[in-house]
Image (tube, rainbow, N blue to C red):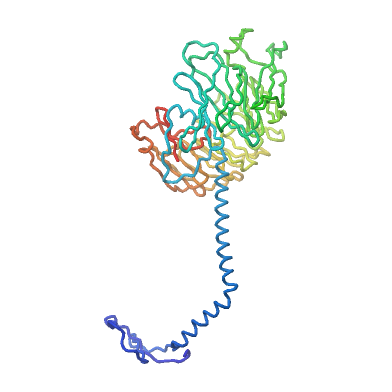
Amino acid sequence: MPGRMHEVELVEDRDERAPARPGPPTDRRPPLRRSGRVVDVELDEGGPDEQRDAVRAARTWLRRRARWLLPAVAVTLGALLATQLVVNQREASRLAELAAIPGVVPPADPSIGVLWRADPGLGSVLRSGTLVDGLLVGGTQDDAGAAQIVGLDPDTGTVAWRTPVDLPAPQPAWTTSAPELWITCTTVPRGSDPVVGCTSHEFGEGVGGVPPSSVWVLDPDDGRVLSDRRLDGRTAMVFTDDALVVAERLPDDGTSTLGGARSARWTLTAHDVVTDAPLWTWTTPSTAVVDGDNGDDDFARESDPAGAPTLEAHPGHLLFAVDTRAWVLSTAGEPVLDAPLGSASWLQVARAGVFIESTWAPSSLYRGTLVLPDGDRVRVDETASWLSVDDGSAPEVVLTAGLTAGGPDGINGRSARTGERLWHVPGIVVSSLLLDGTVYVATTDALSAVDAATGEALWRTELDHEPEQMSTDGRYLLVPGPDITLDAFALHDGALAWTADLAQEVAGDRSPVFVQGFQAGWRDPRLYVWMNSGTVAVLG
């Protein structure tokens, strides 16, 4: 029984062997010897009956409490399962959110390789295509000069449909050779039924002056042409979320500006992309135009690119510029900003509701003015910075880039309310992106991450090579390395997570010397490696 004390001697004998088999049962316990010392130990002499009683008591406890114990276990397991389901749902939701951000590529890991190869014809689809409902839609041209719009699966290369389209004959044509063609496509949401808008751009020996262009609107499900139109070469156009906006020059009204320069007005009209029904119209005030000293010779004026307008669509805004004037409109056609421009100036739509009037100075420096949402202006020697990925976070920060005589000078974060510079990352910026409130910057010798709002330096990773580009899948920064390798750096600390050597797989049956390398397009939906032949290896 507990509490009884025995005097025993502990002896440590390493040479003593244990018996091969147990001896006969006995109540006598052998003495324990250890260096001849005698110690007191307390022995629990509970016998078999007491052990059976303990087991019986445990079983009784379980039987009596099974009514609430089993449900409790079930609740615990259910809670664990529910927690895992929530985690899985959040991960799936996060992946879906990332997939909807232009420029974010699908998840990548060390097993990344060549999914399929695009021939040079489909290579142009990858360069200029748009992703809509999982289908990549873009334009291509065959050897005879005929144009097609193609819909293909970016994961497999399977062509879902091909739609031949007609091009306007370029006028005049200096030679009989077919012009080179560039077709750009964009997704037009149009409510819940997205369509694809594509525009032709002709250039090369067979094109004289500013050529006309064709605009096609297609159903992404089967490639049917829903509408098409031909636009004059001096007409600007752009697609918005639900419309095609066209800027056309009105006939001269005979007025002139100071100094005798001719003046003109432009009308912007938004059309339904499918029915062509007008949605709104806005006309500019009279403004000076630069047509060159060509009199009224229509062909000469058309062949002179001076005075050609530009029309751009940005989230919530349209930017229209011609010669020395620029206007910003809402996508509903309401004027927001009227900006006179110098001969070497241009207007940019930056992020966070800020516009930048930029001027190219003879000293090879940028001179600019931030136009803040409240109308205040702040002089800066910077221009708008381009992001390969912008998820819309840090809405109070506008990003700008500087320029020195030696080249680009870093990236800056400025307050969209005051224009004050919050932070600066020095160096020649190769690429930058914004995700979850963090700006990731690739310079010629390093990767770095800063908090977009405060400028706090989160981490910096030195590189032993200059990166060609920087992409992300939402988990890693994916940076091409030397000899067609791909390095993945963790977003949270910039540590190198893994490297994939892709040279042999990309080259296939070609010599690796024919591999051109990674090339970034306009927020490509996947990672591409381009060959000097125009063939493209699609990675995944």
Q: Nearer the viewer, residue 11 or 115?
A: 115
Where residue 63 sits: x, y (%)? 55, 77
Where residue 47 sits: x, y (%)? 44, 88
Looking at the image, residue 17 sits to the left or right of residue 221; the answer is left
Say which quadrant the C terminus sits in. top left
Q: From where the camera sits, is residue 394 visible? A: yes
Q: Nearer the viewer, residue 157 or 351?
A: 157
- Judge whether 451 appears above or below 149 on screen: below
- Judge whether 478 appears above or below 296 on screen: below
- Judge whether 505 appears above or below 54 on screen: above
The residue sitting at 40% across, 88% down in the picture is 39
Looking at the image, residue 512 sits to the left or right of residue 201; the answer is left
- Judge whether 332 appears above or below 77 on screen: above
Number of numbered callouts drawn:
0
Q: Nearer the viewer, residue 387 or 216?
A: 216
Where residue 46 sits: x, y (%)? 45, 88
The answer to which image quadrant residue 327 occupies is top right
The residue sitting at 54% across, 19% down in the picture is 166
Where residue 199 sits: x, y (%)? 57, 24
